[in-house]
Image (cartoon, grey):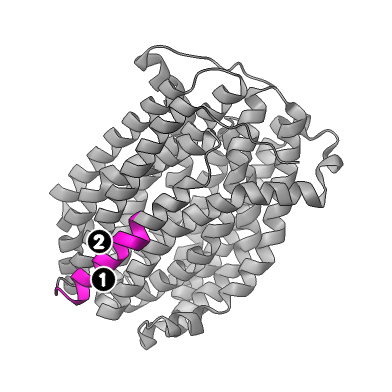
């Protein structure tokens, strides 16, 4: 039930340790993102307007869900540190409380999805897109409970270094989502509505298969699980997770607001933004997996009472190096990448102007997500939210708005502002990692 927590002094050995944790997470996240890629590709070939409507619906859907998903990241430090300390009862309690908290948040998220159409109208989005965007959100909302349970179990498994059940479940769900998209979008001529139905069904497949394939690995931790069900303990876990939810929201909402500003420029800009962010998010999944591995590795080391700063530095170097490769691809092949998503020449023209700017912020995006993972594992949960508030909301978003609508840069101005915001956040979080390495980490417990 318990694997040893090794401590390494060489770069090669630590890279091997981190990558062993990271690659299944990255593969799983790439597979998870693959559903969104397939949905965008499938709907994109119906035209720019349907693709833009799905992009707006997705923006609303995940803009609300990101807070709840961030709260569940409390399981990273709580379970990883408890596992490193061989506190199996605390591990089991964390798993049970995470799933219960996920189920309690799900109905709220489902209700909020019904507000997509009036909400997007208040945010000034093109009227022609709102009906389809609202329908997409209301339909996809039926998959929220599955998404939340899957996310809670996934976070727990990642903290334990058990990623194979998640990877297998995502592969199966991707295949079923692809088949569902083909049948519902084209076979039954349901368009974006069909993509939402396939997405909702896939969430339950993910949850069910992940729980089933991890049942034997998790069962030893769940002895006496009823002792975990107390209101104060759930509130304590929520209090740990709330700063993480805010941190994720500050970042995600910045990108969603950038997408809404694209809507002020028209449907073509919305569709182009969907393509670029789809590509950027796809490349982001690998360093995001390294960030999750960093939270597990650092948390395990802290729980075991071992030094963790060297592992944190290796994670940062690995994440930055991988995103450098993504930046190179974006800068060299923008036209080729754009044409994989759409044949609309107007959309392709905007994508080609945006991808080189997206290439510029890839490195900083990789650094900030890995630094956040290191800090999460070290129990430093509040300052990263302040870094996002400063980098995105005090600097990046205002600058992007000014460049786009006052300086006349249009869509590239919005992306330039995001690049400045990402640079600022990355530098602040990397500096915070160095400070925490000198100060010492925090052991987190819930209940």
Residue that lies at the very extreme toward the front in this rendered image = 439
Residue 202: tell me if it is visible.
Answer: no
Q: What number of labels is visible?
A: 2
Q: Could you say whether the residue bearing mark 1 is in a helix, strand or loop?
A: helix
Q: Main secondary structure of the magenta part?
A: helix
Of 167 and 99, nearer the camera is 99
State how far apart marks 2 and 1 are (Cα).
8 Å
**Residue where numbered disc 1 is placed:** 401
Q: Give the residue at x 82% y 39%.
A: 225
Q: Quadrant of residue 49?
A: bottom left
Q: Residues within 10 Å of mark 2 (few under 14, many from 20)?
A: many
What segment is highlighted magenta in the picture? 391-408
Q: Quadrant of residue 102?
A: bottom right
Marks 2 & 1, CB-CB < 8 Å contact: yes
Of 238 and 412, nearer the camera is 238
Image x and y of residue 359, in percent: 21, 50
The dot on residue 255 is none
Image x and y of residue 212, in percent: 69, 42
Q: Residues within 10 Å of mark 1 (few under 14, many from 20)?
A: many
Q: Give the residue at x 40% y 53%.
A: 388
Q: Give the residue at x 31% y 42%.
A: 427
Location of the C terminus (image quadrant): top right
Mark 2 or 1 closer to N-term? Answer: 1
**Residue where numbered disc 2 is placed:** 417
Image x and y of residue 234, in percent: 74, 50
User: Can you say whether 162 is above or below 263 in the image?
Assistant: above
């Amino acid at each position: 039930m318990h694997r040893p927590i090794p401590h390494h002094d060489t770069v090669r050995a630590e890279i091997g340790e981190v990558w062993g944790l990271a690659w299944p997470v990255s593969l799983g996240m790439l597979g998870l993102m693959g559903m969104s890629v397939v949905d965008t590709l499938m709907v994109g070939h119906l035209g720019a307007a349907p693709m833009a409507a799905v992009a707006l619906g997705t923006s609303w859907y995940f803009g609300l869900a990101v807070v709840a998903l961030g709260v569940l990241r409390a399981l990273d430090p709580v379970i990883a540190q408890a596992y490193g300390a061989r506190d199996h009862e605390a591990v089991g309690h964390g798993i049970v409380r995470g799933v219960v908290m996920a189920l309690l948040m799900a109905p709220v998220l489902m209700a909020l999805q019904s507000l997509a159409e009036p909400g997007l109208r208040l945010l000034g989005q093109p009227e022609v897109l709102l009906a389809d965007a609202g329908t997409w959100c209301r339909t996809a909302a039926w998959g929220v409970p599955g998404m939340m349970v899957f996310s809670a179990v996934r976070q727990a498994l990642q903290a334990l270094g058990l990623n194979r059940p998640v990877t297998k479940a995502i592969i199966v769900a991707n295949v079923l989502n692809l088949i569902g998209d083909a049948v519902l979008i084209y076979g039954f001529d349901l368009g974006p509505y069909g993509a939402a139905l396939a997405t909702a069904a896939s969430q339950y497949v993910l949850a069910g298969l992940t729980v089933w394939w991890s049942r034997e690995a998790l069962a030893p931790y769940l002895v006496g699980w009823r002792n975990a069900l107390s209101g104060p303990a759930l509130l304590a876990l929520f209090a740990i997770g709330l700063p993480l939810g805010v941190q994720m929201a500050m970042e995600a909402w910045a990108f969603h607001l950038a997408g809404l500003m694209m809507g002020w420029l028209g449907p073509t800009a919305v569709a182009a933004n969907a393509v670029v962010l789809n590509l950027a998010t796809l490349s982001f999944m690998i360093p995001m997996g390294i960030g999750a591995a960093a939270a597990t590795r650092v948390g395990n080391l802290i729980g075991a009472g071992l030094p963790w700063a060297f592992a944190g530095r290796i994670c940062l170097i690995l994440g930055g190096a991988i995103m450098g490769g993504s930046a190179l691809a974006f800068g060299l092949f923008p036209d080729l990448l754009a044409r994989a998503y759409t044949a609309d020449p107007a959309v392709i023209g905007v994508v080609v102007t945006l991808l080189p700017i997206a290439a510029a912020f890839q490195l900083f995006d990789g650094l900030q997500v890995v630094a956040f993972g290191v800090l999460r594992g070290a129990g430093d949960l509040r300052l990263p939210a302040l870094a996002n508030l400063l980098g995105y909301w005090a600097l990046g978003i205002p600058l992007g708005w000014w460049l786009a609508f006052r300086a006349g840069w249009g869509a590239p101005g919005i992306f330039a502002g995001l690049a400045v915001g990402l640079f600022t956040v990355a530098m602040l979080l990397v500096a915070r990692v160095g400070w925490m390495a000198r100060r010492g980490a925090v052991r987190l417990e819930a209940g």
